[in-house]
Amino acid sequence: MKLQSKIALITLSYFVLMAIGYILVFVALNMDQTLFIRFLIGGSGVVWAIISIWFVWFKTDYSRLWRELRYRRQYKNIHNIRSINPDYYALYQKYPHSIRRHERHCIHHHISPQEMIEKALRVPEEEWAAREAFRTQL
């Protein structure tokens, strides 16, 4: 199953769980009982919805799925950016660890792809070699 469809189904299940919890709240609001019983039934609907959503969230590792989707999209964009400039792609072939670190830095600081490529091409080859040696040493 594709990652996007997993995320969509899990998100849809949250709305279903909230709707089921709301049924108890709706019943409690419209019943002719004492206030204590109405609070008890309505509160149990809210608590049930919160606990079931929490359970589904952690069992499916929902946060990790969103992170993985985001990183896949970033990787696809970075791959397209690398293929724009042949000199930059050649630099990436020589120094992959250092260039990836440079790209992560530029993404973090919201630097445009053109600026990122220009900055990378301005750095001398000796500097890239030293950075690559340091990255591979770790």
Image (cartoon, rainbow, N blue to C red):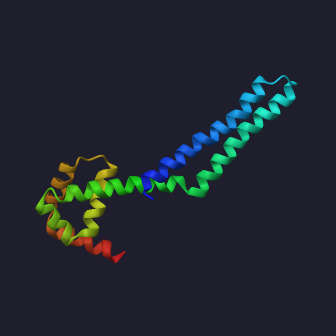
Residue 50 left/right relative to 107: right
Left of 131 or right of it: where is 45? right
Of residue 65 and residue 41, the one placed in the foreground of this image is: 41
Q: Quadrant of the N terminus?
A: bottom left
Q: Residue 90 in the image: state x and y as whole percent.
A: 14, 67
Which quadrant does the C terminus fall into? Answer: bottom left
> Hey, which quadrant is residue 14 in on the image?
top right
Q: Quadrant of the rendered structure where residue 67 is?
A: bottom left
Q: Is residue 9 left or right of residue 38?
A: left
Single out the residue that lies furthest toward the bottom.
Answer: 137
Left or right placement of residue 39 versus residue 104 in this view: right
Whole-percent x and y of residue 12? Answer: 54, 43
Residue 15 spot, x, y in % from top left: 58, 40
Query: Residue 121's spot in the image, x, y percent?
Result: 14, 59
Name the residue at 77% across, 38% down: 44
Residue at left 55%, top 56%? 61
Any part of residue 131 in sight: no
User: How many labels sit on residues?
Assistant: 0
Q: In the image, what residue occupies the spot 20% across and 59% down?
A: 82
Q: Nearer the viewer, residue 23 or 90?
A: 23
Does residue 90 appear anywhere in the picture? yes
